[in-house]
Image: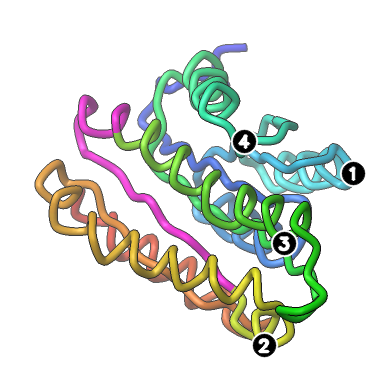
Amino acid sequence: MSGANGSGGARVALVCGAARPPGRQIALGLAAAGWRIAAHDLQPLHLEDLRTQIEAGGSLCRTYVGDTGKGLAARALIEDVLNDWERLDVLMYCLQAAPSADLLMLDEWDWQRSLEINLSAPFLLAQAAAAVMREQPGGGGIFFVTQPQLAQSSLALAAAQAGINGLVEAVASSLLAYNIHSAVFTAAQDEIEPIVAQVLRRLSAA
């Protein structure tokens, strides 16, 4: 279909965690602003409902399912988005895994799995997305959405969120040299519209 690629000037956002809050609301907000949405989640549940809602509002959406905690899978997702849309302007990573056990009770598997979802996947996707964005006119944006309220009861998530903040602080200036904006946004239920507004504002001059 002619409208599903990068022609026509519409920007494309890959939203990871789009099937659930806060990713769902962010995807809907960007779609309402005229963006095309590549909606990703670990499971297909609710993704088709999101696609239907976005398309009913006049934008375009395609869905993607899979675990991106390993390099090959992360790169494959970025390649799939490029094959479908021919460009990628924004990566919004909204997935959060929050095992509730404390230091003495946290299982090693839960710890490792949490790090894959909360830290490894964001890094790997950002790395693959930045390689694409630096080669295209206009650069792009790589943004992470955290939920500090969840981290209050999850040691593993708290550690990973600190890692995400450190990652962005370390790479922000080097990415900006390629006109790639980066930031960490914190999300509460009433803060989704400001996040979308900040993303649009940061990229408005790109």
Asked which secondary structure carries label 3, the reply is loop
Image location of residue 205, percent across then percent down = 19, 54
Number of numbered discs present? 4
Classed neighbour count for the residue bearing mark 4: other residues with Cα under 10 Å, few (<14), some (14–19), many (≥20): many
Label 3, label 4: how far apart the Cα atoms are = 13 Å
Q: Which residue is mark 3?
A: 97
Residue 191 belongs to magenta span:
no
Sequence-earlier tag: 1 or 3 = 1
Query: Looking at the image, which is closer to me, 57 or 150?
Result: 150
Q: Which residue is mark 1?
A: 45
Query: Looking at the image, which is closer to me, 6 or 192?
Result: 192
Image location of residue 68, percent across then percent down = 62, 35
Q: Which residues are magenta?
A: 131-146
Classed neighbour count for the residue bearing mark 1: other residues with Cα under 10 Å, few (<14), some (14–19), many (≥20): few
Classed neighbour count for the residue bearing mark 3: other residues with Cα under 10 Å, few (<14), some (14–19), many (≥20): some
Q: Which residue is mark 2?
A: 152
Query: Looking at the image, which is closer to me, 16 or 48?
Result: 16
Q: Which residue is mark 4?
A: 68
